[in-house]
Amino acid sequence: MFEKGAHAERLFYILAGEIRLEEIGKRLGPGHLVGEIGVFAPDEKRTQTARCETAVELLWIDQSELAQLCYQNPGIAFHLLRLITARLIQNVNSIEASAWRQAS
């Protein structure tokens, strides 16, 4: 789908299939958002590599449409802020757990 460090211009919603975030080995399936961190990152870069593990069906929204949607409905912006914060915490915990297992 996209490589770590690539320009992030879209946020995706998984309708069907499975995507794997390579750097942390996490799998995302239907009902999950992917690409939200890069869309809001100051440098607009992807923080993970996302690979399709199966055939996938996606919905997507680009940055300008998402900005307009957040402006019109601040509740969506607040929801995305919570989602991104939770995802960052999960990613850090996964990386720390992986580093601990490798050190053992």
Image: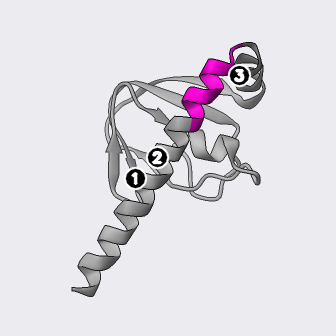
Q: Judge whether residue 90 is colored magenta.
A: no
Q: Residue furthest bottom?
A: 103
Res 103 quadrant in image: bottom left
Picture coordinates of residue 43, whole percent (x, y): 76, 54
Kind of residue at badge 1? Gln
Q: State which quadrant residue 72 falls in.
A: top right
Outermost residue toward the left in this view: 104
The residue where tag 2 is placed is 87
Range of residues picked out in magenta: 73-81
- Quickly name the residue at label 3: 70
Residue found at x 63% / y 47%: 38
Q: Amino acid under label 2? A: Arg
Is residue 93 visible from the viewing direction of this image? yes
Q: Which mark is residue 90?
A: 1
Tag 3's secondary structure?
helix
Mark 2 residue element: helix
What percent of the width, then of the height, locates residue 104?
A: 21, 86
Magenta stretch mostly in which secondary structure?
Answer: helix
Q: Earlier in the sequence, mark 1 or mark 3?
A: 3
Determine the CA span between mark 2 and mark 3.
Answer: 19 Å
Looking at the image, do the residues carrying marks 1 and 2 touch, with CB atoms under 8 Å apart? yes
Mark 2: few/some/many CA within 10 Å (<14, 14-19, 20+): some
* x 56%, y 54%: residue: 3
State the residue at coordinates (33%, 33%): 29
In the rendered view, does 17 fall on the left or right side of 78? Answer: left
